[in-house]
Image: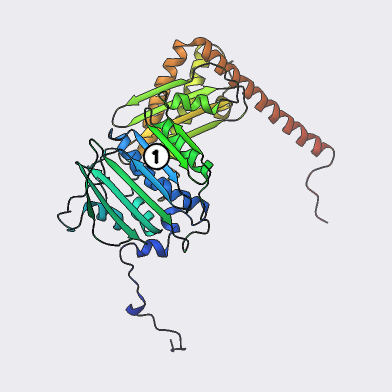
Amino acid sequence: MADNGAEKYTSRQLQVLEGLEAVRKRPAMYIGSTDAHGLHHMVYEVVDNAIDEAMAGYCDFIEVTLHRDGSVTVRDNGRGIPVDIHPEYKIPGLELVMTRLHAGGKFGKGAYKVSGGLHGVGVSVVNALSEYLEVEVWREGKRYYQSYRRGVAEGPMKLLGEAPPNKTGTRVTFKPDREIFQVHSFDYDTLATRMREIAFLNRGLKVVIKDERTGQEEEFFYEGGIVEFVKWLNRTRTPLHPEPIYIYYEGGEIVEAAMQFTTDYRENIYTFVNNIPTPEGGTHLSGFRAALTRAVSEYARAHGLIKNGQNLHGEDVREGLTAVLSLKITEPQFDGQTKTRLGNWEIKGIVEGVIYEKLKEHLEENPAVAEKIIGKALDAMRAREAARRARELTRRKSLLEGGGLPGRS
């Protein structure tokens, strides 16, 4: 082809983005967006690290503070980010975690068996997209500090002296970069909702959120875990049975579920993997739904509660159901960094088997509860069939009255 004056494409045009430059160039690839969703996701990424410490058994307190200047602080009483010099990179672990993508103790068989921040890019991405970020670490009796500007360390990590007796943990303060984000103000209610969720999902974990702009402050602590979560979700609904059905299984993975049927007509199922909400569902939700339909249908048939020829559909069984399904698994495969859908194919079978066996056992041991659940499902089935018959009648009537497709002219 003749050269028509277009710029030649050579290796000079190939650009290599070093370190955290790639994050600042394409932030939406790492946090989903640069609108309000992405802004709040920055807080979730830092909180995820503290939750990982809680799941590992080293942390029982997390505090989130919104400051007047638009910055936010996340503090925990975990072990503290490691500060010793990394043998390969020759920098403190703190600086490595804060400035390198895919650096952390969450890969392979590292410091965490179960983790929400498994991609290992969370806190370094927050650093890259922040105007400034400061970290203070209390570890092994010492207090350490380092500050960064737009992902770059302003100087070496400092030893500030002795830590208070028995104090360990990490405090991260950051201000999202106005050059990156379209929205610059955190919404208290959005963050409080997520902090409440975290406390429900981790029984015995105290989560505090403070807003210095308004003086608002809340503390969340739930010994009852997800059972209390379901009761809270149903606080404005009428339950068919007073106590939620609770299922817990711990093998290679942990499967935990709580469910309560109500007089409502909608289903409300909330799913989580390693404390991360999965609003788009995934293999764990598919397994849960399949087990629920199978267990309820088999019980109904075995006890003569449905007639031959009648079939309960999944939507019948789930009508009025409020449920929380929480998994703790070692190698979650999420669709995308923002982790909205679980993709592990083997999890469907694990969840389905656990929920089916435990729910079937519960129904057999609680026949009064079982009859209420099945009665609700039968009502839903009859309503569905009546709606189908009404649609068919309307179609037939329309055809008889000449309402079919018009002929060709």
- The quadrant of the rendering that contains the C terminus is bottom right
Badge 1: how crowded within 10 Å, few (<14), some, or many (20+)? some
| Position of residue 164 measured from the top left corner of the image (x, y, whole percent) | 24, 39
Residue found farthest to the left: 87
Q: Residue at x 23, y 59 (%)?
A: 156
Q: Foreground: 196 or 345?
A: 196
- Position of residue 190 measured from the top left corner of the image (x, y, whole percent): 52, 43
Say what amino acid the circle numbered 1 marks. Answer: Glu
Q: Can you say which quadrant of the picture contains the N terminus?
A: bottom left
Left or right side of 338 for 83: left
Query: Colour scheme used in the picture?
Result: rainbow
Q: Quadrant of residue 109?
A: top left
Q: Is residue 21 above or below residue 141?
A: below
237 w.r.t. 25: above or below: above
In the rendered image of this protein, does residue 61 appear above or below residue 407? above
On the question of residue 271 being in view, the answer is no
**Identity of the residue drawn at 28% across and 31% down:** 252
Q: Is residue 38 visible?
A: yes
Q: Secondary structure at mark 1?
A: strand
Q: Residue placed farthest to the right in the image? A: 401
Residue 328: give x, y in percent of width and height. 35, 34
- Tell me where residue 50 appears, x and y as whole percent: 34, 41
Residue located at (66% from left, 22% from top): 382
Please identify the quarter of the rendering in which residue 313 is found: top right
Please state which of residues 161 and 326 is positioned toward the viewer in this rendering. 161
Which residue is under mark 1? Answer: 63
